[in-house]
Amino acid sequence: MGKQNWKPGNMLNPVPAVMVSTADENGKPNILTIAWAGTVCTNPPMVSISVRPSRYSYEALVKTGEFVINLTTEDLAYACDYCGVVSGREVDKFAKLGLTPLAMPNVSAPGIAESPVCIECRVKSRSELGSHTMFVAEVLGVTVEDSYMEDSGRFDINNLGLVMYSHGEYFSLGKKLGKFGYSVKKKPSA
C-alpha cells in the first residue's frame, strides 16, 4: 500500500457545519456559516470559531464580543449553505430564509429559533493566525429544543440529524459505532 506526501493543508474532516449568529452594535443581526468551530475546554465551558476578517460579521464579533453557535440539522442544511455563500452586506439572511431571531438570555446576539441547540458565547481572546482569526469564547448558556428531551431528562442530541462538512460537501451524522469506552469494556461472561 502506497502513500503520498502532500504540501501542508487542512485535511481534518469532517467538521461540524454551524450557523453563527451575531448582532452589530446597532442590533442588526446576521448569520454566517462556520465549519471551523470546536470545543476548547470543559471547565469553564469554552469553544472556538475561526473567521476570515473579510466576512461581514467579523466586525460585529470584534466590537461586541458576542455570538451564538446554532447547530445545523438536515432541515437547516440549505440555510447553512446559503449563509456561507451570501454576504449579510447585501441580504438580511433571517428574512430571506424565513428564520426567526431568538432573544437569548445572556448575550445580545440572537439565536436561530429553528435550530435545536443555541450556544451563547462571549469572546475571551482573539488570535490573528493568517487567513483566519480564531475567537476563543466562554459558553454562557445553552438553549435546547424541548421536543428532543427524553422522558429521563436526557437531551437526545444524537438524533437531531446534525450536519457535518467535509471537503466542500455536507453530510448528515452517520450511524452509531459505539460509545465512549466501548473498546475496553469487559464483555459479560457466558
Image (spheres, rainbow, N blue to C red):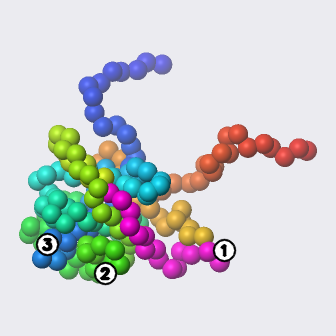
In terms of sequence position, does the residue under pointer 2 or pointer 3 come before the other?
3
In terms of sequence position, does the residue under pointer 1 or pointer 2 come before the other?
2
Cα–Cα span, label 2 and label 3: 15 Å
The reply, left or right, for residue 133 in relation to residue 6 is left
- Residue stretch in magenta: 137-153
Nearest the eye: 115 or 109: 109
Residue labelled with disc 2: 103
Does the magenta-highlighted stretch encompass residue 139?
Answer: yes
Give the residue drawn at x 20%, y 80%: 95
Q: Quadrant of the C terminus?
A: top right
Q: Secondary structure at mark 2?
A: loop
Residue labelled with disc 1: 152
The local crowd at label 3, few if under 14, some if 14 to 19, many if 20 or more residues have their Cα within 10 Å, is some
Identified by mark 1, the residue type is Ser
Nearest the eye: 132 or 95: 132
Cα–Cα span, label 1 and label 2: 28 Å
Does the magenta-highlighted stretch encompass residue 150?
Answer: yes
Give the residue drawn at x 78%, y 42%: 186
Identified by mark 3, the residue type is Glu
Q: Secondary structure at mark 3?
A: loop
Count of picture labels: 3
Residue labelled with disc 3: 25
Give the residue drawn at x 17%, y 59%: 62
The reply, left or right, for residue 166 in relation to residue 42 is left
Identified by mark 2, the residue type is Ala
Question: Which is closer to the viewer, label 2 or label 3?
Answer: 3
Give the residue drawn at x 15%, y 76%: 28
Q: Secondary structure at mark 1?
A: loop
